[in-house]
Amino acid sequence: MRARSLWLAAAFLWSSATWAQTQPVRIQFKAVLGEEVFACGHSYTGIGTTKSTIEPKDLRFYVHNVRLLDETGREVPVHLNQDGKWQLEDVVLLDFENGTGRCSNGNADLNMEVSGTVSGGHTYRGVRFILGLPFDKNHTDITTMPPPLNLTSMSWSWNAGRKFARIEFTSTGLPHGFIFHLGSTGCVPNTPMTAPPTSCAQPNVAEIFLPEFVPGESQVVADMAMLLKDSNVDVTVKEYKNGCMSSPGNPDCAPLFANLGLAFGANLARPQTVFRVGDLQETSKSKQQ
Amino acid sequence: MKRKFTFRSYLLLILVAWILAYAHKAWAQDDIPLEERLRKNPLPASATHLESGGKVYRDSCAGCHGMDGKPKPQTEQSTPAPQGDLSDFRMESIRDGEIYWVVTHGIENFMPASEGKLSDTQRWEVVLYIRELRARRKAIEIAQLGPYRWKLPVGFPYPNVPADNPMTPEKVELGRYLFYDQRLSLNQTQSCASCHKQKLAFTDGRPRGVGSTGELHPRGAMSLANVAYSPALTWANPNIHQLEQQALLPMFGENPIELGMSGKETLLIERLKAEPKYQKLFAAAFPKESNPFTVANVVKAIASFERTIISGDSPYDRYARGGDPNAIAESAKRGELLFFGEKLECFHCHGGFNFTGTVDYFQKGLPEVEFHNTGLYNLKGKTSYPVPNTGIYEFTQNLDDVGKFKAPTLRNVMLTAPYMHDGSVKTIDDVIDHYGAGGRTIKSGPLAGVGAENPNRSDFVQGFELTAEERKDLHAFLESLTDKSFLTDPALSNPWISVSHPSGQGVEK
């Protein structure tokens, strides 16, 4: 009897200790346009400087190096569950399109969360992550890398890398669509020019910091209306064709980069305005219902 | 007179150094008489003669050329001439009679003559032994390359092949089927061959490519002739080095859309699996894989096929490296001298066995990648070339790189019009005019500018004047680079045509 109590106590202590070492964490993401939830097949009004009406064609982006802040403000890395599909090492692909409506170039699968474990025994407040891919993964071979780095839709062979974000929609003025592909530019190999890229002049990865985020209570809200707030989505600069493919000289990129907190040309980076913290229980006026 | 003499010495020096083995071998223009060039070695390649040749070589030649044919490091005592590697592939382009002549007469100021020191038989034995140096090296190269048997023109080096995609006949065969298969485009209207047509030396005759959805490509389809030797692919992208990597661009690229398969890899694989012929072809090409139907294998097979797209049997090849001094007309021979001369300077960017400065091959050591600005545009404003075709500036973002593009191979150039990256030069005469003027002047409109004043223009584009006769000669030379057997080689043709395919669907016609 006594031995059993001791054993139970030991087991309890051991499991507490384990719990204290790591704890599971889920960081949910929600894509919205203002007050409305993002969904393929729906249209959204009042977008950009011309108050255009837009319809989504795609919304996917990579994030990596996800961290929570503990009570001392220290950054604690989230170790991602290696699910063989959305998460690989420290990289996650977030996918908000379900292949319906104008999103027909996408797929049915969705992924709107980052899941992993984080050091236990702390009270976390605040999340940091990087929008985009780390350099050493960006320029790898899409035909041989595991998911989610094997998707041709996120590949960007011209730049020997990948698109970090793929955000596409039609608008009142552009029925064929406005395209925003975020990725590194100015990538070059060393001399002789026969190696993979060794550096990119514009990495175009954005550190996102949301200090008010509380695990279990908050979610990360990505607001596409905020991304497009300063853009005229009804026209594009002709020489760069249909939108912003991150070309450094393309004026259509400037407001998009600014809102993501990225430097662009002579414009210095300023705080991003696309991502914010939302209440996990928050009920948005969803058009999905 | 002095200048002429120096030039001749230079020609002969080159002949030995082989550095520009293709550049200065006009039959009638340097000191070796035609009948001497065409002499065949009278000795059989017997062990006795070889042994004897080896001894003579050791005593008379190895001091500078090295026992294995590889030049010895330069010392103060050694001649200022860069000795060529007597065991490398360029030796295949040099005839017995030419080697014999150089061994006999030496090279003024650089290499002593052996006439009077060695008997006629000894000299021919040395020629035998020099041939043996190349044969030995080639045997080593073949062993290193693996079991695949290349069918290469005489004097072509072995291409580089990525370690993870060794050549096999089965992969080449599968790649050929894929290359001509319209199922590789989303709407099943285009294959690789839609823009790379064999009869046009694997170009499409258009100024700029047109994708499967009708989208206009900013640039034209490049010839695939000898693409296995190119360490930089497409017109101006310093990041695309391998054909496996390049094949992903037309398939999955979206800016512009070419085959339009972005995000449709699952569909692509399903389509391929549904073709009974592919069941056998994929299994044969990737015998160790339980599921060979992957995007990685698709591009590996296509790249393997592309490495066999080799052109080296033009009249010029037969004239310059074969045994036929009359394979090209006298006019073409004069054109050759113009092309390789310092007046036109063409060969600086279009030299070597593939007539381009961007080249790599097996054990080359240093791959060469060059991009040049030829003064095609000179716009006012930030970039002197119209967006999006700013050359490698797009990647390096260095203003000195605006307008720098790869010099394409000139093999089969008469079939690859229109010319330049954007197809903006219609005919070969317009090309000659462009270089003659040292750049193109556009008088009005949004592209107005004096190309010759482009600050990045290559130093080799200085302009020249040609008489009507010279222009004809240059024409004749460029025409002599057309390789008819390449254009009709059944091994490079559409394999689906011989396969019964009643519906005709999914097949490049």
Image: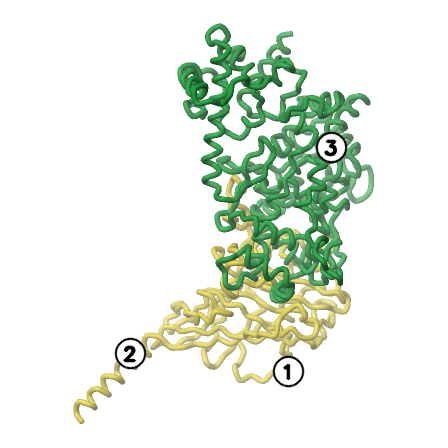
Q: What type is the residue that disc 2 sits on?
A: Ala
Looking at the picture, tell me which residue is in the foreground, B420 or B308.
B308
Query: In the rendered view of the protein, which quadrant contains the C terminus of chain B?
Result: bottom right
> Disc 2 and disc 3: Cα gap in Å?
76 Å
Looking at this view, name the residue that lies furthest to the left.
A2
Residue A7, above or below A70: below
Discs 2 and 3 share one subunit = no
The colour scheme used here is by chain
Q: CA distance from mark 3 to mark 1?
A: 61 Å
Return the chain for callout 3.
B
| Whole-percent x, y for residue A193 in the image | 54, 42
Left or right: where does residue B437 sit relative to residue B233?
right
Q: Say which element carries label 1.
A: loop
N-terminal label among 1 and 2: 2
Residue A231, located in which quarter of the rendered image? bottom right
Chain that is coloured yellow in the picture:
A
Q: Is residue A267 visible?
A: no
Label placed on residue B86: none
| Quarter the N terminus of chain B occupies | top right
Q: Which mark is residue A17?
A: 2
Q: Secondary structure at mark 3?
A: loop
| Residue tagged 3 | B439
Same subunit, labels 3 and 1: the answer reads no
Q: Quadrant of residue B336?
A: top right
Q: Chain of mark 2?
A: A
> In front: B254, or A38?
B254
Residue B452 percent coordinates (x, y): 72, 32
Q: Residue at x 56, y 14 (%)?
A: B101
Q: Which residue is mark 1?
A: A286
* Figure chain in green: B
Q: Please, what is the three-letter code of the amino acid marked with disc 1? A: Ser
Contact, CB < 8 Å: mark 3 with mark 1? no
